[in-house]
Image (cartoon, rainbow, N blue to C red):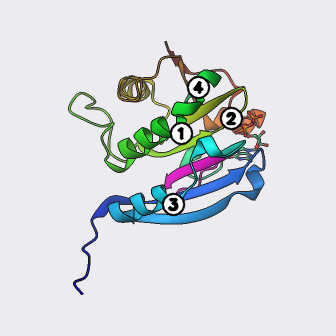
Amino acid sequence: MSEVTKHPLEYSWNVTFWPSNEWENSKHIITISTIEDFWGTYNNLPHLTELGKVNFAFFHDGIRPIWEDEINRKGGKWIWEYPRYMRSEIDVHWLNLLLLLIGETLISESTPTICDREIFGATVHTRSAGDRMTLWTRSTDPEIQREIGKALQMKMNIQGSLFFKSHCDAIQINSSYHSSAKIVLQ
Ligand code: MGP
C-alpha cells in the first residue's frame, strides 16, 4: 500500500480546551502540523453547538494561550461577539477563522504592514449570553492593529463592533474583557 503524502502547514498549531470558567484546568488536545492533521482533528471534535459553556484555543506551537506568556505580555487581542440568535452559525465562523490562520490569509497585499508572525492564535468561548472569539497578536502597535482589525472584520464578515485590548491591561485587572479598549472598530 502506498504511503499518503501529508501537506505541511507553515506553522504547527496547538489545540487547547478548557470547560466553563475553569481556565486553570486547560488541556492540550493535539498539535497540528499538516492539512491532513487539521481536517482529521476538526472532523473528530464535537461541534461547538453541541457543547455547553466551553473554550478552545488554537495557537502557534511554542506560544501558550495565556496573557503571561513572554510573547503575549507585549501583545493584545481583538475581541468580537456573536449574539445568541447566531449560535447555530458559530461552528462555521470558527472554522473560517481557523482556515484564515492556517492558510495565513488574513495577510495579503492589502495589509502591507502585517508580518506573518504578528498573528499567532485565536480562541472561541461559548456563553449563554452570546459567543465570543478573539485573535491574539504580537504587538499593540495601533497602525498594525487597525490593519489587522479591518482585515478581520472584512474576511470574517463581522457585523458588530471589534475591540482591541492589551494583555498587559488584562494582567492588571485579571480579566480578558473588562479593561478599556485601545481600538474600537464599528
Ligand atoms: P476571562 O478570559 O477573563 O473571561 O477568564 P471568561 O473565561 O470568558 O469569563 P466570563 O466570566 O466572561 O465567562 C476568566 C478568569 O480566568 C480571569 O478572571 C482569570 O482569573 C482567569 N484567566 C483567564 N485567562 C485567559 C488567564 C490568563 O491568561 N492568565 C491568568 N493569570 N488568568 C487567566
Crowding at dot 4, Cα within 10 Å, few <14 / some 14-19 / many 20+, comes out as many
The residue identified by callout 3 is: 44
* Quadrant holding the N terminus: bottom left
Q: Is mark 2 within 8 Å of ligand 1?
A: yes
Height in image: 78 above or below 103? above
- Say which mark, if any, is on residue 75: 1
Magenta range = 55-67
Q: Residue at x 37, y 59 (%)?
A: 11
Residue shown at 30% from the left, 40% from the top = 105
Q: Amino acid at mark 3?
A: Asn
Label 4, ligand 1: CB separation under 8 Å: no
Q: Which SS class for mark 1?
A: loop
Q: Could you tell me if the residues under marks 2 and 3 are in contact, i.e. CB atoms within 8 Å? A: no
Q: Nearer the viewer, mark 1 or mark 3?
A: 3
- Marks 2 and 3, the one that precedes in the sequence: 3
Gap in Å between the C-alphas at discs 2 and 4?
A: 13 Å
In the image, residue 114 above or below residue 151? below
- Residue designated by label 4: 81
Pinpoint residue 50: horizontal percent, then vertical percent.
Answer: 63, 45
Which kind of residue does numbered mark 2 sit on?
A: Ser
The Cα atoms of the two marked residues, 1 and 3, are separated by 32 Å
**Vertical position of residue 63 compared to residue 124: above or below:** below
- Residue at the (63%, 31%) spot, across then down: 131
Instruction: Kindly identify which numbered label has been placed on residue 114.
Output: none
Reading the image, the residue beneath label 2 is: 176
Amino acid type of disc 4? Answer: Glu
| Disc 2/disc 3 C-alpha distance (Å) | 29 Å
Quick one: SS at disc 2?
A: loop
Sequence-wise first label, 1 or 4: 1
Q: Nearer the viewer, residue 5 or 32?
A: 5
The part of the image, by quadrant, that contains residue 149 is top left
Question: Nearer the N terminus, badge 3 or badge 4?
Answer: 3
